[in-house]
Image: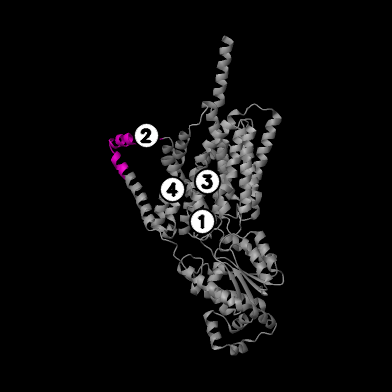
Amino acid sequence: MNHFNTELTRMGLRRQRQSKRRYITGFDGIRTLAVLGVIIYHLAPSTLQGGYLGVPIFFVVSGYLITYLLIQEFDTTKKIDIWGFYGRRVKRLYPALVTMILGTTAYITLFQRSLLVNIRGTVLTNLIYGYNWFEIGHGQSYFDRFSGESPFTHLWSLSIEGQFYLVWPLVVLGLLLFVRKKTQRLAILMVVAIVSAVLMAALYSPNNPNRVYYGTDTRMFAILIGAGMAFVWPAHKLNATVGRNQRLTLDILGGASLIALVYLFFTMNGQAASTYRGGMFWFTVLSGVLVGTVAHPGSDMNRLLSNPVFSYVGKRSYGIYLYQFPVMIFYEAKINIGNHPLFHALVEVALIMLVTEMSYRWIENPMRHYHYGQLTSDISRYLKQPGAHRFANTFAVAAALLFGLTAVGFVQQPAAAKPTALQKTITARQAATKKKNAAAVKKQKALEAASSKKKHDKAVAFSKLSKADKKLAKYYYLTPEEVLGSKQTPLTAIGDSVLLDDSGDLQDVFPGAIVNGKVGRQASDMKDIINSMAQQGQLAKNVLVNIGTNGYVTPEQADDIVHAIGPNHQIFWVTAHVPTREWQNSVNNRIHKTADKYQNVHVIDWYTAAKNEPKWFVSDHVHPNDYGNRHYTSLIAKAIVKANN
């Protein structure tokens, strides 16, 4: 009997040790890796073009941890307190989320009212964790970094996690009660995960990636991979005492997966079809391997990813992720960061960490551990203390201001974004350009045939000018030779909204020019556009390229553009003037390097000509006004005519 009682005691102690929750410090290191990827990507996309993949890492960690804790609770108590789980999640996530939403809405109500479009739907869907689906229908591409970014865009991922938290306790309970074998539970989750990945591949469209990027069904495989691992690899049941070979295997798998993830951070382009047709899924599988090796107490990976810095950042990763986008967008709306991107990036990071620390100390931590049932009595007791009223009144005023300004934003939400004067101009010029392009193809052929004729000397050139040509020469600061030269020069121009804005002026100086411009166009779009125009016979001997306003140009993209146009064409690439964006200098360096690499590529240095001329631009500091367009057109005409003489 005594032996039996002793065995029972030992079994009880063993169960207590097994059920004791082990804080896996290495997960803070994984969270740090993920949040650094996202932050660096948002600050400098070309530096870490796969940094957006920090989000699936977060999903894997959440899937594993939440499932692991629910399994541990069931093993200990034979039940899952679902309402308790919901209460803990709300206390953990809602206070900072609500603070961020109110603070951001109040700010844009005061200072950036153009962002009030859809504010009611944005706020309400975030509060019910349905924003990702709202973003599919109303938001812009996650990778469009220029066209009026919303400070709420990044919250799509929190909505997916919120939906996961809502249903997952019930799913885990069902699997534990009705599916006996761990391998069967894993198989069920992996089948659903693979279906999710297949949906991502099948539904992906390069013209509208929002559906697969924001969709719960197409992103849930990351959470399911983490959850599946928790069923077969629960940390509280793993033995810390392992053999040398087993430890070495764990360390090799963990180290290799970590190196692979960092490599993919640098190489996996978020706009490449391969990313959505398997790339992101296999990245997530590697994330699951890393999570599993860190969770195992017999591996050295947990120790490798545990240090005070990772612990600090990891514990605050939720707040960092939450506040980073509003800080960046509001800062960059007021400061021209293009000439000193590194300095301004450091300032932005400092501001993000300051706001996050304030939130962590005064909102997240206090509210996470607070018992809301005693709220009334606590307020009554606090207000009876000497000096408390002053602080309480200050807090009440601040809260009232946030709620009040949010209400004002709700009331004043415009039905739709009103087009600015610039947008109206670009739309009108786009329509006019299409009409002129229709007749330009025939004219291009005549110009090609005439381009071999000798040029006139200065006196003859001036005598050949009509009254309209003389006016044109004066308006665009051109010599008579340059006016006549441009009229005889065949030209195809391909680019973004800056080119569209200038299209009317360009076709006045180059009457036969074909112009193909689009608002928001990226370098990644250019290859297909050029190939299509070539097939239609729309590529003239001279091709003007104006791309780089809306984002980075990679070496591969630059090579693709040059190769698509071909060696028999002269390429004139206009440098970017985008002082409000960190990619300005990178784009211009890439253009100059491309010109050094290819003999038929010439640089038209609009950036150098315009960088000290603020009066040439509208309020966004990027698109030229009428006066700026005259100088822009003049610079292009002089360069092309000179190269063709």
User: Is 482 drawn above or below residue 380 in the view shown?
Assistant: below
376 in magenta: yes
221 in magenta: no
Q: Which residue is mark 2?
A: 373
- Residues tagged 4 and 1 counted as in contact (Cβ below 8 A): no
Residue at the top extreme of this rendering: 1
Across and down, in percent, residue 143 comes to 56, 56
Disc 1 residue crowd, few under 14, some 14–19, many 20+, Cα 10 Å: few
Disc 4 residue crowd, few under 14, some 14–19, many 20+, Cα 10 Å: some
| Alpha carbon separation for disc pair 3 and 4 | 18 Å
Q: Which quarter of the rendered picture does the N terminus lie within? A: top right
Q: Which residue is mark 4?
A: 100
Residue 137 is marked as: 1
- The count of marks equals 4
Across and down, in percent, residue 594 comes to 66, 64
- In the rendered structure, which disc, 1 or 3, sits on the residue that comes first in sequence? 1
Q: Which residue is mark 3?
A: 160
| Alpha carbon separation for disc pair 3 and 2 | 29 Å
- In the rendered structure, which disc, 3 or 4, sits on the residue that comes first in sequence? 4
Q: Nearer the viewer, residue 514 or 232?
A: 232
Across and down, in percent, residue 338 comes to 53, 60
For label 1, the SS is helix
Name the amino acid type tagged 2: Gly
Q: Nearer the viewer, residue 107 or 292?
A: 292
Circle 4 or circle 1, nearest the eye: 1
- In the rendered structure, which disc, 2 or 1, sits on the residue that comes first in sequence? 1
Q: Which residues are magenta?
A: 370-393
